[in-house]
Amino acid sequence: MNRAILHVDMDAFYASVEQRDNPELQGKPVIIGAAGNERGVVAAASYEARKFGVHSAMPSRTAYKLCPHGIFVYPNMRKYGEVSRQIMVILEGFTPLLEQVSVDEAFLDVTGSLWKFGDAATIAARIKLEIKSKTGLTASVGVAPNKFLAKLASDLKKPDGLAVITEEDKVPILAPLPVSKIWGVGKVSEERLHQLGIRTIGDLQEFPLEDLRRQLGNMADHLHALAHGRDERPVETDGESKSIGSENTFDVDTSDLDEIKRCLLEQCEEVGSSLRQEKVAARTVQLKLRYSDFTTLTRRRTLVKPTQDEMTLYEVACQLLAHENIEGKFIRLIGVSGSNFVVPEVQTDLFEQQDEKRTRLTRAVDELRGKLGKGAIKRGASIK
């Protein structure tokens, strides 16, 4: 029996929420992110703004040049998170096999739900209708026998679309699409494929596998399988959050190491507080850096002992930072995150004797921040 996989992708999610809540924004180019005259990036853009070339991750100043009449709105992540939870509750009503990929998209394996709700396309239509009814928002849904094809299908008829790719029609549907549509094909690998004369997925379907292996090594079999619509990955249901993080774009690119570390400490405080609030400990700490030329890198370390302590996060983040030798280099953005979550044990970080004083202080600070706001208390410790 073929699997029945759905990919649900909300349409211009952040912007659509703002347009829903403010009728004056409906039908207008809405850009979620920093103001057009500020440093920062676009978090999302309405379809009206996308017509002018505005897209997420674009610098806000570039977005302003492309769409000077656009309406810039600062993101309200708390509100978006609440709407996301509403949507995930709706999806859980159709199957327990739910993989939330981000705040506005998820995979569902509805194979075991067909007897109850009808075929996969019927389930997709019901999901769209229920999301619209309960949140006032539209979603695009892709239906297919695997995750790769379901995600591809969800993008075929956006916005407010529903597309089905079957085992019988998957190869001809894939053939005319550019190879960049294949998962794992970025700019570098796309250029490498172009050098081999492979520009469409159809070109890749016809390229001899042995020749592909000689040219691309281990990557060849993965690309060959996806080009023919084969993807055996299951819908993963482990955990709701993939990571908890914080990042900041500096008003002016900076090479001031003290300023960079002060920002990093504040981010670690925020991440640590969120980890404790979520009652999880992170086994992996990740540092993100973006230089003034927009070169971006991430570095991570997996800990022997999971943590939800901000100073442990800070110490590890500083070690990762030191390895990059950034002295004299100008930094545009810095971020830190925790991932690979586990449930904290009684002994983890919080109750070891040597950390007991720090634990009591951390709890007291969490309580005060909860009452007075996140920015009410700052650490006075010197920056290492």
Image (tube, rainbow, N blue to C red):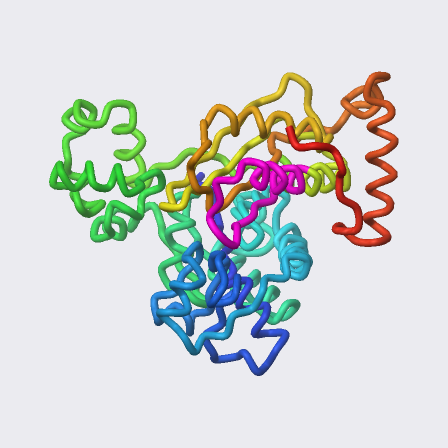
* Residue 306 screen position, x and y as percent: 68, 24
Residue 362 found in image quarter = top right
Residue at x 13% of width, y 38% of height: 195
In the picture, measured across the screen, residue 114 lies left or right of residue 196, that is right
Q: Is residue 323 above or below residue 116?
A: above
Comparing 139 with 254, the one in front is 254
Quarter holding the N terminus is top left
Q: Is residue 189 magenta?
A: no
Comparing 13 with 247, the one in front is 247
* Residue 180 screen position, x and y as percent: 28, 46
Q: Hey, which residue is sitting farthest bottom in the picture?
A: 24
Q: Is residue 295 above or below residue 319?
A: below
Quarter holding the C terminus is top right
Comparing 258 with 374, the one in front is 258
In the picture, measured across the screen, residue 328 lies left or right of residue 251, that is left
Q: In the rendered image, is residue 370 in sight? A: yes
Residue at x 50% of width, y 38% of height: 288
Residue range of the region highlighted in magenta in the rendering: 243-268
* Residue 294 screen position, x and y as percent: 38, 46
Q: In the rendered image, is residue 90 in sight? A: no
Q: Is residue 249 magenta?
A: yes
Residue 182 found in image quarter = top left
Comparing 61 with 55, the one in front is 61
Residue at x 88% of width, y 31% of height: 360
Q: Is residue 238 above or below residue 68?
A: above
In the picture, measured across the screen, residue 35 lies left or right of residue 360, that is left
* Residue 144 screen position, x and y as percent: 41, 49
Q: Is residue 75 above or below residue 115?
A: below
